[in-house]
Image (cartoon, coloured by chain):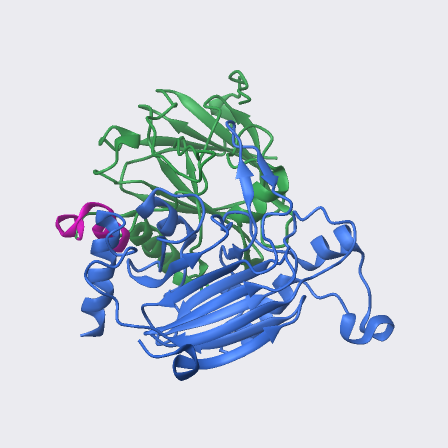
Chain colours: A green, B blue
Amino acid sequence: MSVREAVDRDAASARLDRELADGLGWIHELGTGETLRIVDLSGNQAVDTLFFDAHDYANRYSAVDTIREQGSAYLTLGSRLLALDCEPLVTIVGDTCGRHDTLGGACSQESNVVRYGEHTRHMHACRNTFLTQALAWGRGLDKRDLSANINFFMNVPLTPDGGLEFADGISAPGKYVELRADRDALVLISNCPQLNNPCNGYDPTPVRLLVWPA
Amino acid sequence: MTSLAERLILEAILPGGASWSRVCRRGTALTLTDVEGGANVSALFFRASDPLERYCMPDTLKAQHVSRLTAGVALYSDMGRVLASVTQDTCGWHDTITGHATASAVADRWGAVSYHERRNDWRRSAREAFVVELAKHGLGRRDVVANANFFSKVAVGDDGELSFVEGHSASGAHVTVRFELDTLVVLSSVPHPLDPAPEWSPRAVRLVVARVPDVESDDPVRVACEENERGFAATEADLR
């Protein structure tokens, strides 16, 4: 696990600096060379994230191509997040948490019913947030474009015997991840509203988003 | 139930490096047999009546707390329903987290060749095969999602390191996928992109589609976990 110590980027020089409350979404274009920092303000929040080539949305983040090509199931400092064309969309250039999941997916009303029972059907869920943001963005982005995402700050270890666990978080207040755009990229975030998962201590919290110019 | 001959719907050989697609109905099962050993079959699944509903690797893994497919595992759609179930398996592990071969992967690993040089031994990638087969059903690049890789095992180490297991599937190995909804199945028999074999040697697979008995209340996949009981209930509720 690679963890890089905090780099002193000056928030005052960021072109964007905002908080994203738990349960809300955000969609935004990053220019080539720009850096996005996501700060886990209160610790163990799951930040469900998708990336797209800004000029070709069908060429989107591919979790399986990314982990195969890097030879590791987890994302960390140095991970190049590949599009379906197997070229990087963004690279993790800063990471004070150390490990991020990309196999656990985003919560949905339908998967909540399977996982937790009928009583969770009408709880808020990431895939509704993704859809809300995608449809508001327009330009043809819709459900077909939502595939396996990244869960920043979430710890989902795989076991050698073929299992998968949702383990206690390894993040903490103030931990962050930084992503440098390797091409013009569209980023879509759902700041997860899940109330049924121990990953976030059953307590979704806000994150801070900063973008620095190239 | 009756003999296989009476239940048989289709029997075919899928040559190595080829592709295939078909709608497999609820109440039937597809058995894939690795004819020579060392096969890989990359597979995508879509609900035939609404292909916007499709196999969802993350939902499949997290509902059942697994990171691979084998007998007893349900293949979930992204809408909380069970598209298909793995009912029999002699391999014990089928990958679903490392994708499939792209054109550049085939060219880098084994070298690009042209149709003009090789005629029907032209090397096509699983990605190209998927996009073409999907297009036959009105789908396309946007519908390329995380796939299953039957007969391939990619082991996961303590720190998440991935390693392809050579010799995982022997001649005669077989796996049976039973369909719980009418499902568009798209297959490619191109080698797994992590297969270290120095020579391009895609392997043939036998395909058998046959009718199977109704799923009972004590079906092993249904009762494998509470999540699957709910997944099967949601699937059956949608058919009423």
Name the foreground residue: B119 vs A180: B119
Name the foreground residue: A18 vs B113: B113
So how many labels did they put on this image?
0
Q: Residue at x 77, y 70 (%)?
A: B121
The spot of residue B86 in percent (x, y) is 39, 59
Q: Is residue B67 above or below residue B186?
A: above
Residue range of the region highlighted in magenta in the rendering? A109-121
Q: Is residue B114 above or below residue A146?
A: below
The quarter of the image holding the C terminus of chain A is: top right
Name the foreground residue: B207 vs B137: B207
Q: Residue furthest right?
A: B117
Q: Residue at x 76, y 58 (%)?
A: B200
Q: Residue furthest left?
A: A119
Is residue A185 visible to the viewer in this orientation of the structure?
no
Horizontal side of residue B11 vs B194, given as left or right: left
Q: Is residue A40 above or below residue B149?
A: above
The spot of residue A78 in percent (x, y) is 60, 30
The spot of residue A98 in percent (x, y) is 49, 24
Name the foreground residue: B66 vs A55: B66
Is residue A103 visible to the viewer in this orientation of the structure?
yes
Q: Residue furthest front?
A: B3
The spot of residue A146 in percent (x, y) is 42, 56
Q: Main secondary structure of the magenta part?
A: helix
